[in-house]
Amino acid sequence: MFDTIINFFYNSLDAIFLPIIKILHPGMSILFIAFIVSLIITLANKFLIDQERLGEIKREMQEIQKKYKKYMNNPEKLEELKKDQEKMMQLNAEFMKMSFKPMIYTWLPIILIFIYLKHVYGYNGIYQNLYPDWNGVVVYLPTVLAKLLLVDFWHWLGSMLYHGGFKIVSNNALGWLGWYILVSFVTSTVLRKIFGLK
């Protein structure tokens, strides 16, 4: 039963994405998938969160933080700061509640996309079966960028948590997961600015 569901899932996404995966470089196809996922998340945030109220909450929280920094060593203002602290906790709770609303709708698709990307670009995945000489590298970053992003640290951490699979080819190389994280961060930042999200 479970195998039937998994096969249906893979076959459905293969029908959508495999034509793109076959014609595009892995870096470009992952960028495309990351863009689609970021767009869905951004639209969910835009339509499920009251952006004006979110902006108000952020402004109120910043004002309270400024006030707290200004008067934290003033014993006369201590009682007022306690009231502000309670207000800050209420605002923070409201902020968290608003932020979690879109996650209810987006967390499952995100997890499914990660599972699918591993199915395609992971060790013995579809892409490696199509191109047996492929070594798992999606992109090579410039050395400076690789150092800034601590790629060698992430390689080390990955080797501690995951055994087997592709070998590390270079400290400048990113596999599918590292590339997805990088491009999804960039695409979501750009889309948030385009859609005017707070």
Image (cartoon, grey):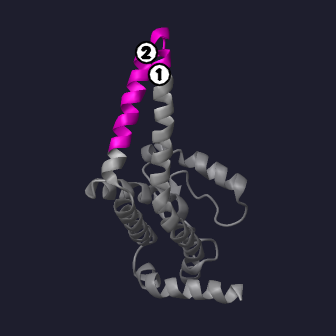
Q: Position of residue 19 (x, y in %)?
A: 42, 85
CA gap, disc 1 and disc 2: 8 Å
Asked if residue 57 is among those painted magenta in the image, a careful observer would answer yes
At a point 55% along the width and 69% down the height, the residue shown is 108
Q: Which amino acid does the dot numbered 1 rest on?
A: Leu
Q: Nearer the viewer, residue 17 or 94?
A: 94
> Callout 1: few (<14), some (14-19), or many (20+) C-alpha neighbours within 10 Å?
some
Quarter assignment of residue 159: bottom right
Q: Which amino acid does the dot numbered 2 rest on?
A: Tyr
Quarter assignment of residue 71: top left
At a point 28% along the width and 58% down the height, the residue shown is 195
Q: Are marks 1 and 2 in contact (CB under 8 Å)?
A: yes
Tell me which label, 1 or 2, sits earlier in the chain.
2
Q: Is residue 71 above or below residue 38?
A: above
Q: Position of residue 125 (x, y in %)?
A: 60, 77
At a point 55% along the width and 76% down the height, the residue shown is 120
Q: Nearer the viewer, residue 70 or 19?
A: 70
Q: Is residue 129 above or below residue 155?
A: below
Local secondary structure at mark 2: helix
Looking at the rendered image, the disc whose residue lies closer to the viewer, 1 or 2, is 1
Would residue 139 be found to the left or right of residue 168 on screen?
A: left
Q: Position of residue 180 (x, y in %)?
A: 48, 62
Point out the image quarter for the N terminus.
bottom right
Magenta-tinted stretch: 56-80
Q: Which mark is residue 71?
A: 2
> Callout 2: few (<14), some (14-19), or many (20+) C-alpha neighbours within 10 Å?
some
Would residue 117 be found to the left or right of residue 139 on screen?
A: right
| Dominant secondary structure, magenta | helix
Q: Position of residue 85 (x, y in %)?
A: 50, 29
The residue to which callout 1 is attached is: 81
Would residue 197 be found to the left or right of residue 142 on screen?
A: left
Residue 175 visible at all: no
